[in-house]
Image (spheres, coloured by chain):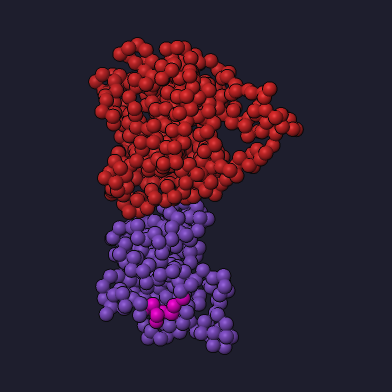
Amino acid sequence: MVGVKSVPSPAISADDRSHEVDHPSSQVAQFGAEQPLRLDCGIDLSPFQIAYQTYGELNADRSNAVLICHALTGDQHVANEHPVTGKSGWWDTLVGPGRPLDPRHYFIICANVIGGCMGSTGPASINPATGKVWGLDFPVITIPDMVRAQAMLIDRLGIDTLFAVVGGSMGGMQVLQWTAAYPKRVYSALAIACSTRHSAQNIAFHELGRQAVMADPDWHNGAYADQGIHPHRGLAVARMAAHITYLSDAALHRKFGRRMQDRELPTFSFDADFQVESYLRYQGSSFVERFDANSYLYLTRAMDYFDIAADHGGALAKAFADIQTRFCVVSFTSDWLFPTSESRALVHALNASSARVSFAEIETDRGHDAFLLDVPEFLDISRAFLQSAGKARGLTGKND
Amino acid sequence: MSVQEVLPLNGLAKEQSGQFRADHLLVAEMVKPGSKVLDVGCGDGDLLQLLETRGVDGRGIELSREGVNRCVAKGLAVVQGDADTDLVNYPDDAFDYVILSQTLQATRQPKVVLENLLRIGRRAIVSFPNFGFWRMRLQLLIGGHMPRTDNLPATWYDTANIHFCTIKDFVELCDTIGVKMERAEALDLYGRPLRLRLPWWVWNMFGEQGVFLLTRGGGK
């Protein structure tokens, strides 16, 4: 008989994950009936809450606030230990003492996106109208909806203009949406490994992931919470497929090659003989410990719908007309999810708007994930961009 | 006589000017402080940094990734791009000056590039090595081979410079496309401007490079 081992079950219980949904280990801003979130789909979401983390202090003239926008599976825990996994912050290469975004000089904010599952209102939250988990009754949200919610949070924090909005991947989409929707509130924008619209290939990968979740019998048409279960297997497969797109052929080859996992010879089974299989299974199973399956559907959908040009009569340059924001656009040579050509199209549109833009393509074989890794050239460029913007903003000497 | 004495730049300390190239100092002197400038082919960003000391809002385009990344790492607003293909993306009148420093001879379509410079910018500053320089002529006439100089050390087979011209050729091109020369300078081998108002043929013979401040209109 052929030996089969499926993806291992998560080590962390569903309780740990779902606890963060309603009782996040971070600050929470509540928005009541008088402050609904107007969604692109036409629905007013109310009440809702935003879970957010801050680092550093807001200065006297409120000019040093930096908003970090997280990627698809990120959250507000940018530079602190993760409350569910216990791992260090997901962007501690960029954020921290001595890092390009140093909390000693900036007031750094990161909010869990609307639709997320780490404390901001999303499909895993309780629907106050029914007292049950939202599930698929939660309205479909968009990147502009996420940014609208963040703007309400920034208002609540008493900040008019953000010194910088920074993000990669889906976070980069939010950065661009911020500049298109609130150009006067964004002094500088660092948009990394992203695009002004989601490509057909990326929509295709997302559809693959969603179908994997929906094919899991534990998904129960999104109502799994009522059954006290979670579609681990479907979500893990979705994550495994997505994770491949975050790397590159060269990186996988360098990391794993065709090396075997704890064995010399093939087992003639469907066990994880190869290291790369074992790695992917681990990625899948550790992901489901901390992420909600429906949230994954909603957030991938939001990315698919993203198209700034379409929101501005089809002309991308119109979205950025007369913008005063200082831009830095960064791409990575081996990123095939958001290839350099996407960044170049953005830069052309920004040039057509006479915007002040820097654009660097970083040579690396580490794929899309490079923005999260210790890639010195990327970090040097981010630091220099922020320092130069800080100088122009009058933050000189505080951000070295 | 040092270049600094020839070109006193307001706001630039004397000891500072030594670190900048002679032709950059001349270009910087042509740019009105506080204006908006695009430097096409900005290399490592030395000229943009010099312009920043004069309160100029500077942007750059550079072909090589290494050059771009070095510029961005200096905090400069520089994008990767090609003078031949990417200038069309910029709107009319976007800049007060567009600078093309030692790059014209490396473009595929110098005429189109020049026209674009003066569409995007109200003024253009163009500098290029003069192939009519006496040493060039001598190398071709006596040596019988393609000229090479300290500033242009590449051999004919690995040079990026595919459209060399002389000062005289450039003046004729400006006439042809209706570009007015507001100011013209020729620099000698040491980067010093030829001081006297000499006839064109002298410049064409003794200028190692030409630096021109151009504006729209004029010509034939």
Residue B155 screen position, x and y as percent:
58, 74
Determine the residue positioned at 31% across, 26% down: A156
Does the magenta-highlighted stretch encompass residue B218? no
Residue at the left extreme, as displayed: A34
Q: Percent position (x, y) of residue B70? A: 51, 54
Of residue A162 and residue A144, the one placed in the foreground of this image is A144
Residue extending furthest right?
A264
Of residues A295 and A176, the one nearer the viewer is A295
Residue A181: x, y in percent? 30, 39
Given residues A139 and B58, the one toward you in this image is: A139
Residue at x 54% of width, y 88% of height: B141
Whether residue B165 is in magenta: the answer is yes
Range of the magenta residues? B164-171
State which quarter of the image contains the C terminus of chain B: bottom left
Q: Is residue B87 above or below residue A256?
A: below
The answer to whether residue A338 is visible is yes
Q: Which chain is purple?
A: B
Determine the residue positioned at 55% across, 84% down: B139
Position of residue A63 relative to residue B205, above or below, is above
Q: Residue at x 52, y 38 (%)?
A: A246
